[in-house]
Image (spheres, coloured by chain):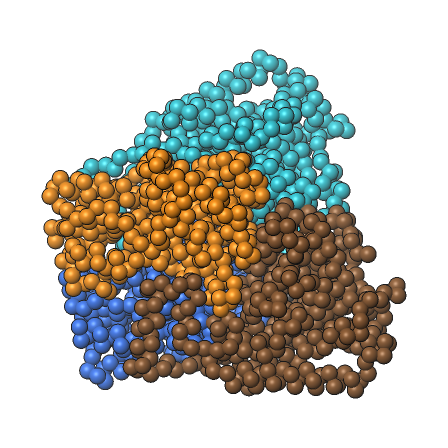
Chain colours: A orange, B blue, C brown, D cyan
Amino acid sequence: MAIQTLIGAVNDGLRTAMRADESVLMFGEDVGLKGGVFLATGGLQEEFGKERCFDTPLSEDGIIGAAIGMAMNGMKPIAEIQFQDFIFPAFDQIVSEAAKLRYRSGGQYTAPMVIRTPYGGGIRGGLYHSQSGEAYFCHTPGMKVVIPSTPYDAKGLLLASIADPDPVLFMEPKALYRSVKGEVPEDYYTVDLSTTRTVLEGEDVTVFCYGAMVPVVEKAAAQAAEKGISVHVVDLRTLLPLDEDGVIEAAKKTGRVVTVTEAPRFCGYAGEISAIVAENAIEYMEAPVLRVTGFDTPFPNTLEHHYLPDARRVIDAIEKVYSF
Amino acid sequence: MAIQTLIGAVNDGLRTAMRADESVLMFGEDVGLKGGVFLATGGLQEEFGKERCFDTPLSEDGIIGAAIGMAMNGMKPIAEIQFQDFIFPAFDQIVSEAAKLRYRSGGQYTAPMVIRTPYGGGIRGGLYHSQSGEAYFCHTPGMKVVIPSTPYDAKGLLLASIADPDPVLFMEPKALYRSVKGEVPEDYYTVDLSTTRTVLEGEDVTVFCYGAMVPVVEKAAAQAAEKGISVHVVDLRTLLPLDEDGVIEAAKKTGRVVTVTEAPRFCGYAGEISAIVAENAIEYMEAPVLRVTGFDTPFPNTLEHHYLPDARRVIDAIEKVYSF
Amino acid sequence: MMQPSTTDPAKITAMHTILNSAGETTDGYDPGLPDEELLHYYRSMKLVRAFDDICLKLQRSGRIGFSIPNLGIEACQIGAASALRKDDWFFPSYRDFGMALYHGVKAVDMMHNMFGNAHDSAKGRQMPVHFSFTDPIKFASISSPLGTQLPQAVGAAHAAKLRGEDTVALASFGDGGTSTLGFHSALTFAGVWKSPVVFLCQNNGYAISLPAHEQTASDGYAIKGMAYGVRAVTVDGNDVFAMREATLEAAAYARAGDGPTLIEAVTFRMGGHSTSDDPSTYVPKEVVDEWAQKDPIDRFEKFLAARGLWDAAKGEATTAECLAEIDAAAKEAAATAPPKLETIFSDVYEEIPAHIRKQGEASFELQKRLGEAAAGDGAFPL
Amino acid sequence: MMQPSTTDPAKITAMHTILNSAGETTDGYDPGLPDEELLHYYRSMKLVRAFDDICLKLQRSGRIGFSIPNLGIEACQIGAASALRKDDWFFPSYRDFGMALYHGVKAVDMMHNMFGNAHDSAKGRQMPVHFSFTDPIKFASISSPLGTQLPQAVGAAHAAKLRGEDTVALASFGDGGTSTLGFHSALTFAGVWKSPVVFLCQNNGYAISLPAHEQTASDGYAIKGMAYGVRAVTVDGNDVFAMREATLEAAAYARAGDGPTLIEAVTFRMGGHSTSDDPSTYVPKEVVDEWAQKDPIDRFEKFLAARGLWDAAKGEATTAECLAEIDAAAKEAAATAPPKLETIFSDVYEEIPAHIRKQGEASFELQKRLGEAAAGDGAFPL
Ligand SMILES: Cc1ncc(C[n+]2csc(CCOP(=O)(O)OP(=O)(O)O)c2C)c(N)n1
Ligand SMILES: Cc1ncc(C[n+]2csc(CCOP(=O)(O)OP(=O)(O)O)c2C)c(N)n1
Ligand SMILES: [Mg+2]
Ligand SMILES: [Mg+2]
């Protein structure tokens, strides 16, 4: 096993899938010769040729619309959206089409495809290179939404997404692209979708998180441990369809729940976790169900480190529910 | 005061605004000569001319983009999106532009405008003429989201939305267009945004709802009353920015909460209400915080009456929390 | 015969007619088709008209919620469809179902959709006229949001091309559809990729109430091909032969690897936008009267008559036959049960995930305990 | 002089040059401008270049995160800007700030934005080069999502037209921008509404790494005007006079109520897409060398020299002056404090709503109690 960065694992996953299955295609803006603006697709055009890894004109609507058509006609398209912030021109194709095709055609037509896109803050990208839009897609039945937080999961979840019979939005935490490293098997393997990962076993407080918030929560949990608070950390990693039973169980375990996301709070994903807990485990709760999230503002630039949840804010919430 | 339908009140509100202020413009697909597919804009072109009420080419992106430019340059545009289901081609203009213009320009440019659109089920419209997409916009800081449920509120909230300095998505419950009637003052008046309306005072269970779910909840509340359960019904009417304190207070009042929306459940608006309650009033809760919502599927056609929450489902939830 | 370059506007905007209103063909054109095939064209057009007539009655009597009339545009559908093979892809709009009828989709299968019943291939989830068939042709699931099928057609065509197949994809849409983002991205991509797509723009004069000349300031719609380096032609949409030839040529061009074609079929929507729409408030009567002279079936009857294949009695017999077929189909569909409650919850994903399964179970349990939900009246306003 | 009809492709695609690489003008053209104005053009172009140079250094040394170079396209910006009035609207892209400099926006105000500090008119919320000014010109807030400014320009222009004003809106974008939905809807609407908009497509050869000829299959970009009935011209984008004249003409056409124009300015991005991009992996060296011969400032210097307004020494003096001005601006901006924490929470709405106010208060309280959040390194990958 080699030690890889998260983006290295994505590249490895793509390469592995393209070697295993001729029908897998990778396309989007600047993914060919340039290898993507983050270099996630580096070397793929070289290895697989211009027919299997190619650049497209500058239209996210065209990218996703064409991907749907390819998927309907037997290919396995992987479409890159350069930044998640630029997915909105394709919103109609994703929400109205990819997500609803199987249902509306009574199962006659399907769109098994993967949309890869880097998301989140931490690179001083300001309003439009930092957003975390997962909630938009998690409110869209028919979509699957996957976010890895480790190199191992990045490759395994990506390969599972590519093998999945339904459209998957695969969101890559760009803040972690090169900042996390880990062992990644060289061969093909998958990590099952709709399973959570227990990052840390703990007894006092349960923290749910995913993507770039996982290392932040790990840091906070380590600090909490020093203060004698034992934190149970769960990486949700498939946001939709969520392993709800796993969430409910983990919430019941400690009776104190915090969810951490970098997206704005209002109507965001953290609220769904709170709602699931309030609906299914309220008798077990010994404290308010808290959310630590980005603020309900657009994403700022210079002050992004104040906007993004950090260990300070997470530990503050952990202590609040612990001492309630 | 005249008795009007909800759509009549919308038409009245538009007419009142256009008479009061020359800069108010009303445009969209088929809103001119035809008066809109639901006739919400009937007679406006006749009274105000083609320069103030006009049809556009078939591009929601163009409609909203142009509205933003008009708003930047001193007009007060009201853009109609024929069905909320067709707002997605304009998603980028709404989410990336209208909602963020004030913030990203440091307050130098703003987009005070209203987007009117009929939403929701009940007309056998199937997947694409029935959706309730409020959660997408409520997760978008910078937008305001307003949904009336009575003719009085329809006119008053619409006039308040038109007078508002920020972009407002005004969602009209098409199922109520002609099915609810009520007194509507002839003159100009406003109903303040970010205020809730207590539909029914009650002591045992609090039910939050809005739009077309209000009459459904009223019916359920009446049935509950017969069974001796006193239901407190709150019409949220401005979903964003929400009167959170009002919600928390109403939740604390009974300690038993149900939220009813017709949109899918997962990551939907009802979850935000549950989360607010779980965060701020959990000590007061005597039962699980329940949601009665549309299912996490696309909107069906023939069976839409099974999909949409009805009094049966609402009363079932009320009894569950009451007898918990 | 009508292969203009994409850079000569005069050629692109010149209208191609083969069969005129008097039933005569240009330059002694002969379709080279056996009589049965010609009669199949005729019958297909008449079937569309019968389908419309019966649906209008069903809608007026409240049996179905909604229908989309095709009066006046039958030749577009049949002419274009006749030029394609059974292994080609169709990415249709809601006003294209004549193509399905031509290729042998059964009227009763269409009627099941109009009623949204248990035998509807879309399982009662879509509004009427939003068909979806895989057999005998790939008639891809119709969507309501306009223009979305266009880049999908490009993708499907591109997939075929990558595999070295010679199938083409037909993407059909209206004059209004050209303003959508799907149109723009599809033509951009197809131009660059040289995708084997036939873009069929049926300019039927209106997008609901907006006249085609207020939809865009361009000189017609075919000219838009120039913005994308896409071959383009303008065709008389009420002329089944011109439609057939233009589509054949576009398909051959595509199969040869030369790329897409944009066909503008100039025609006219003689009825309302739908059974809920009253066009008299916005369509001038003179315009309708003028187009009534150009009826596509009339002129085809004259052509058939000249070949001894048609007379008034035969025409009436065909009408009666078609009406009977559609009527029987409607009766069968009307007598079919609605879809089962389970259909709400399936097909969101290949496998039903836990949260949806739970919602379904709760719903079945509720229904057992408290009875069925009450159905609304199902009247659709548009 | 260059007013082609919108229906003759040859005229639309013919390149208009006035000032050639040797510094000579066509047909004895004289700009009819006072010497100071000519020198203002020159200085403005040199200021852009100086701004780029200093920003590159600031980025390389980690003082700012990101910048967008303009090497090679200075004449597009200055030529177009010079044709507009101070009361016109600018809807720019991120590669247009020469227009602001030309019209008197202060370099220091731009530098405040590059540093995202407390004096930044965007309050440190946007990435560098996403400027927003209202004074002395309406240089509308730049957005990252491409193409969105185009229908907004149409709306702003339409508003002016409804009020009977004769201002125009300039909407600027790149070759890549033409594939966006904003381009399609803006040209559709502007065509139908005859909006007073000047659409300026700066075809600089690349959209990041995609060559302009793979972006679309059309014969250049101006030809796209035909799809919308929009007047269109092709202009040598490295020629400040051709740019000025084409824009003047388009603006006059718009002010007269005749509608929009699409100008394709043919130019070349001589550097990377941004300071984070290495173009050598995808731009052939020969192409760069060829374009180096057509430098817009070089040829303008030759023109000035022929008028006795320029020599090498004067050129160096101007360079030094411009660098000093920008350097001083950068130093001032670097010394300015970052925005206050409060700025995260204001300007979402005109009034801060309760839920955001609470989030802000909690944040201030946390900062007092637990100290400031730690800043990241701010390196931007693109
Ligand atoms: C994106 C979108 N916007 C609006 C609508 C509502 N709508 C349905 S059909 C129609 C007009 C379509 O006109 P055209 O493309 O000319 O097709 P035709 O109905 O004439 O066949 C409109 C506006 C829609 N279905 N999708
Ligand atoms: C909708 C959208 N998609 C993708 C991007 C990422 N992106 C930023 S600039 C750019 C290329 C733009 O090229 P062009 O329009 O030619 O302008 P240029 O940079 O050459 O001036 C891309 C793809 C974006 N900003 N917005
Ligand atoms: Mg039409
Ligand atoms: Mg470019």
Residue D87 pos. (x, y %): 54, 42
State left or right for residue A96 relative to residue D34.
left
Q: Residue at x 70, y 26 (%)?
A: D20
Q: How many marks?
A: 0
Q: Could you say which is closer to the camera, residue C33 or residue D225?
A: C33
**Residue B256 quadrant:** bottom left
Q: Which quadrant: the N terminus of chain B?
A: bottom left
Q: Is residue B234 visible?
A: yes
State left or right for residue C152 relative to residue A172.
right
Residue C231 pos. (x, y %): 71, 51
Q: Which quadrant: the C terminus of chain B?
A: bottom left
Residue A75 pos. (x, y %): 53, 52
Q: Is residue D104 above or below residue C119?
A: above
Q: Is residue B65 visible?
A: no
Q: Could you say which is closer to the camera, residue B320 or residue C281?
A: B320
Q: Residue at x 34, y 29 (%)?
A: D336
**Residue A176 quadrant:** top left
Q: Residue at x 68, y 78 (%)?
A: C47
Q: Could you say which is closer to the camera, residue B52 or residue B90?
A: B90
Residue A211 pos. (x, y %): 33, 45
The single residue placed furthest to the top in the displayed view is D313
Q: Is residue B40 above or below residue D13?
A: below
Q: Residue at x 45, y 60 (%)?
A: A99
